Amino acid sequence: MTTAKDLFMIAMGPDNSVGQGDLSLALAGAELIDLIGAGAVALDSDRIVPNSPPPLDDRFLGEAAAGLTRQLPYERVEDWLWRRGRDLSAAYQAALEQSGELTPQRNSRLPIGSKSLKAADTPARRRAADRWKDREPTLTALAAAVGIGDERSGEGTVLDDEAVTSVVAAVHDAVMELETVRQRRTIENQAFANLWRGP
């Protein structure tokens, strides 16, 4: 399992309600953190510098590594989150459904997507739950970025890696930017509706 899959499993929890856009951005950040950990990339300030890709035994990480910009100027972390994150939560959901790691659930609502699903009791789900229970810093910080957990701001989470800290901060910024866009659209839609209603 990867950090992204663990994060997705945590987001599937019955007490969590995470928007697909927010989760997609956080999943892209989680993938980037795992690529850093695998030595596939390094950060130079806010730029993602690709290295010779090591063997990656995860399909999504392999796709992420294959999609890296390998020419100067290298891609900025923020741009990576938006590009890689497009519809990423839906892709994870489809893959986990296909593998049987997500199963239908009756009489409940799914916080992401339109189907009512729950994480199956698999070793992968238990591993994600263990990381969450142990308050593993990277997973906790990424979850906080999308509003999961008690430390919603992420301020209580201490990360000891500068690159990981930079990625988590970029995820926080991207999620806030997405929320700003949502609020602006809501205001514009309300103004448009008021215009048609008239005085």
Image (cartoon, rainbow, N blue to C red):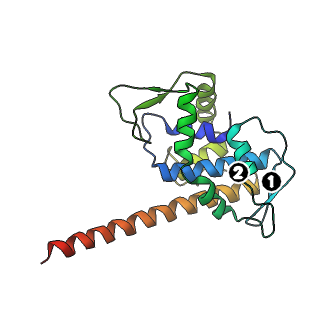
Q: Where in the figure is residue 174, as x and y percent of width and height? A: 56, 61
Looking at the rendered structure, the secondary structure element under dot 2 is: helix
Q: Closest to the observer: 156 or 20?
A: 20
**Residue 62 showing in the rendered view:** yes
The residue drawn where x is 59% and y is 35% is: 132
Q: Position of residue 19 (x, y in %)?
A: 45, 49
Which x, y percent locates residue 95? 58, 34
> Going 53% across and 37% down the picture, which residue do you hit?
93
Give, as a three-letter code, the residue at label 1. Val
Total labels drawn: 2
Quarter of the figure with residue 187: bottom left
Name, please, the residue furthest toward the left.
199
> Which label was assigned to residue 106?
none
* Location of mark 2 (residue): 32
Q: Which residue is mark 1?
A: 41
**Residue type (three-letter) at the residue carrying disc 2:** Leu
Q: Residues within 10 Å of mark 2 (few under 14, many from 20)?
A: many
